[in-house]
Amino acid sequence: GAVVSQHPSRVICKSGTSVKIECRSLDFQATTMFWYRQFPKKSLMLMATSNEGSKATYEQGVEKDKFLINHASLTLSTLTVTSAHPEDSSFYICSAPRGAGGRFTFGSGTRLTVV
Amino acid sequence: GQQLNQSPQSMFIQEGEDVSMNCTSSSIFNTWLWYKQDPGEGPVLLIALYKAGELTSNGRLTAQFGITRKDSFLNISASIPSDVGIYFCAGQGTGNQFYFGTGTSLTVIP
């Protein structure tokens, strides 16, 4: 079936550094990728929608200069957390629609810890 | 982003009991999905609903798309220990993006 490979699964970085998270569709083309953030024991919050070849659309309250999204090809979307701070520590998950009927494939998630 | 109201927030039940949880929204949705998430993993789709009034089953799981298109419920019958996890509803808004419920944490006591 359709798979979205997300890397890294875990990353610990120092405050002030940047971290890149990749989501790659392995056997289908993902023209759209959704990026979610999840705080411990909380729901998934949609951060932004990336579309291949165009600028990402950010949800209200999400800083586009802090969470840089690039969707340069039909199989790869990246989220870069710039100048990370401890409050950016979270679980980040991507998902891509596949086929018709509202079916999505989720990445396995990235646990980011900023120290 | 938009969030859906999901209840209950947590449940502690005995193995073999039935479980019911629901989601409500102030907006009308065209699609409702129910997911289960295990710790440290991404959500896994359980049931998808595409039409108001639709009732769909997946093994011991049953979900319904409310007639008003603003709510949905998920039932789990005869719970087992592996049902433990966090269950999320998701509603599809305009475009393809989904908005998630606040989650129901389920604990099954053997």
Image (cartoon, coloured by chain):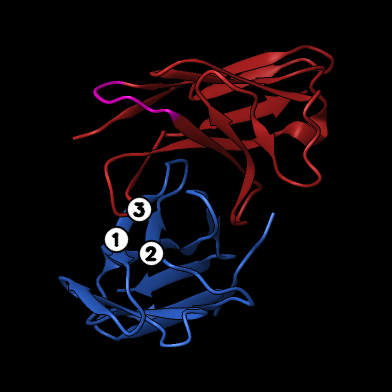
- Colour in which the image shows chain A: red
Could you say which is closer to the camera, residue B91 or residue B23?
Answer: B91
The residue marked by circle 1 belongs to what chain? B
Q: Residue at 28% across / 66% down in the picture?
A: B81
**Alpha carbon of mark 3 to alpha carbon of mark 2: how far?**
12 Å
The relative height of residue B85 versus residue A89 in the rendered view (above or below) is below
**What colour do you see for chain B?**
blue
Dot 2 falls on a residue whose secondary structure is: strand
Which quadrant would residue A89 be assigned to in this image?
top right
Figure check: B95 above or below B33 = above
Q: Is residue B22 visible?
A: no
Kind of residue at disc 2: Trp
What type is the residue that disc 3 sits on?
Gly
Marks 2 and 1 sit apart, C-alpha to C-alpha, by: 6 Å
Return the residue at label 1.
B46
Q: Are marks 2 and 1 in contact (CB under 8 Å)?
A: yes
**Magenta extent:** A26-31
Q: Which residue is mark 2?
A: B34
> Which residue occupies 48% across, 25% down?
A9
Q: Position of residue A30 (x, y in %)?
A: 38, 28
User: Does the CB distance between marks 3 and 2 fall below 8 Å?
Assistant: no
Q: Residue at x 38, y 58 (%)?
A: B36
The prevailing secondary structure element of the residues shown in magenta is loop
Which of the two residues, B53 or B39, is positioned nearer the viewer here?
A: B53
Q: Chain of mark 2?
A: B
Assess whether mark 1 and mark 3 are in contact (beta carbons under 8 angstroms).
no
* Spatial separation of the CA atoms under disc 3 and disc 1: 13 Å
